[in-house]
Image (cartoon, rainbow, N blue to C red):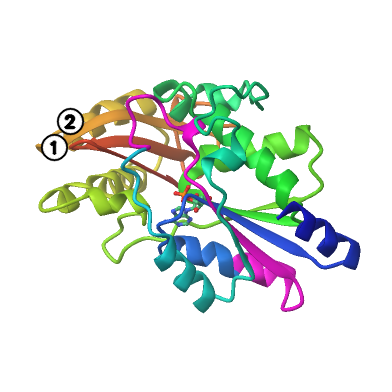
């Protein structure tokens, strides 16, 4: 992949990268389209498909994360993707599991809150694998989804601070018709869990409604209490966190107003789902 990328670079071909963990859905494909729009018909779009072990905690779903490379390849072909880069664990890490690998990229500020608090080694795995992908694929642009807002913000910070010569594009979250954010993990939502999962989107709508009604800033602490009660009325739902913050710095706010960003993580049964939106 890197040899090919260097050849493209020498020939002046523009390259767009869409990093994914596979089991592609329409949200991923929208990022592919965004990458194509950015590099043009003469450019190359690379989709990386890699379930990165170093970003999963020991009790998380690494081994059962859904995988279907044949299906992903079909979807990429239909979308006009030029190259799928799907390395195996031994190509990315000497022993395959991240053990015996000693160079990590760590963002130490934005990565502390929210997802970083609940999943302490998660972002270290993300920034490390994304830095590796940037070095391997040498893209001019890389496209990330707003669905993982904190991740996109951290990757932007990393690229700026480590001088990666590329542009990061953040594309909007694609949702199911009822509002549930598309995610490979939605596959876990069998039976009534799929209905209960809508509580993430309903929480966002609840806060938007409250801001509209009150027409002035609302205390974050009050909203958090209310949302916890609302979410945990669903029998299988347990709130992990809900946070209100400035969208670009992720700095938490006490007063929630229009333009404040909201993010939450909720367990629906064993499945942990996240969502976020501008209010
Ligand atoms: P994943 O395969 O879940 O690691 O996601 C790969 C990329 O797709 C990340 O940049 C995600 O933010 C993005 N993504 C995932 N779901 C969505 C969605 N529903 N809408 C837009 N982008 C998404």
Residue at (21%, 35%) from the top-left corner? 270
Is the residue at mark 2 in contact range of ligand 1, meaning its CB lies under 8 Å from it? Answer: no
Residue 38 is situated, as x and y percent measured from the top left of the image, at: 70, 67
The residue singled out by tag 1 in the image is 236
Residue 20 is situated, as x and y percent measured from the top left of the image, at: 52, 52
Image-quadrant location for residue 23: bottom left
Residue 33 is situated, as x and y percent measured from the top left of the image, at: 58, 70
First in sequence: mark 1 or mark 2? Answer: 2
Residue at (27%, 54%) from the top-left corner? 187
Q: Is residue 184 left or right of residue 251?
A: left
Image-quadrant location for residue 109: top right
Q: Is residue 272 above or below residue 13?
A: above
Does residue 76 show up?
Answer: yes
Q: Is residue 190 magenta?
A: no
Q: 278 or 3, which lies in front?
A: 3
Q: Is residue 54 magenta?
A: yes
Does residue 153 show up?
Answer: no
Dot 2 falls on a residue whose secondary structure is helix
- In the rendered structure, find residue 229 and report the number of the disc placed on it: 2
Image-quadrant location for residue 17: bottom right
Q: Is residue 44 left or right of residue 88?
A: right
Is the residue at mark 1 in contact range of ligand 1, meaning its CB lies under 8 Å from it? Answer: no
Dot 1 falls on a residue whose secondary structure is loop
Quarter of the image containing the N terminus?
bottom right
Q: Is residue 262 left or right of residue 227?
A: right
| Structural distance between the alpha carbons of marks 1 and 2 | 13 Å
């Amino acid at each position: 992949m890197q040899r090919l990328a260097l050849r493209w670079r020498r020939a002046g071909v523009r390259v767009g990268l869409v990093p994914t963990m596979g089991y592609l859905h329409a949200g991923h494909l929208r990022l592919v389209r965004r990458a194509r729009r950015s590099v043009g018909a003469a450019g190359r779009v690379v989709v990386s498909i890699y379930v990165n072990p170093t970003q999963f905690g020991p009790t998380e779903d690494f081994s059962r994360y859904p995988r279907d490379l044949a299906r992903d390849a079909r979807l990429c072909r239909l979308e006009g993707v030029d190259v799928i880069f799907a390395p195996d664990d031994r190509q990315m890490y000497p022993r395959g599991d991240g053990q015996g690998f000693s160079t990590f990229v760590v963002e130490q500020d934005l990565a502390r809150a929210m997802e970083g608090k609940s999943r302490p080694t998660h972002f270290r795995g993300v920034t490390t694998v994304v830095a590796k992908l940037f070095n391997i694929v040498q893209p001019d642009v890389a496209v990330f989804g707003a669905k993982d807002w904190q991740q996109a913000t951290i990757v932007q910070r990393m690229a700026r601070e480590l001088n990666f010569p590329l542009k990061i594009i953040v594309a909007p979250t694609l949702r199911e018709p009822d509002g549930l954010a598309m995610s490979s993990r939605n596959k876990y939502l069998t039976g009534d869990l799929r209905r209960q999962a809508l509580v993430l989107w309903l929480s966002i709508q609840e806060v938007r409604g409250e801001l509209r009604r009150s027409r002035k800033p609302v205390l974050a602490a009050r909203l958090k209490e209310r949302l916890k009660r609302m979410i945990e009325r669903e029998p299988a739902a347990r709130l992990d966190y809900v946070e209100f913050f400035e969208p670009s710095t992720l700095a938490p706010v006490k007063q929630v107003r229009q333009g404040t960003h909201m993010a939450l993580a909720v367990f629906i049964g064993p499945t942990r789902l996240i969502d976020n939106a501008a209010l």
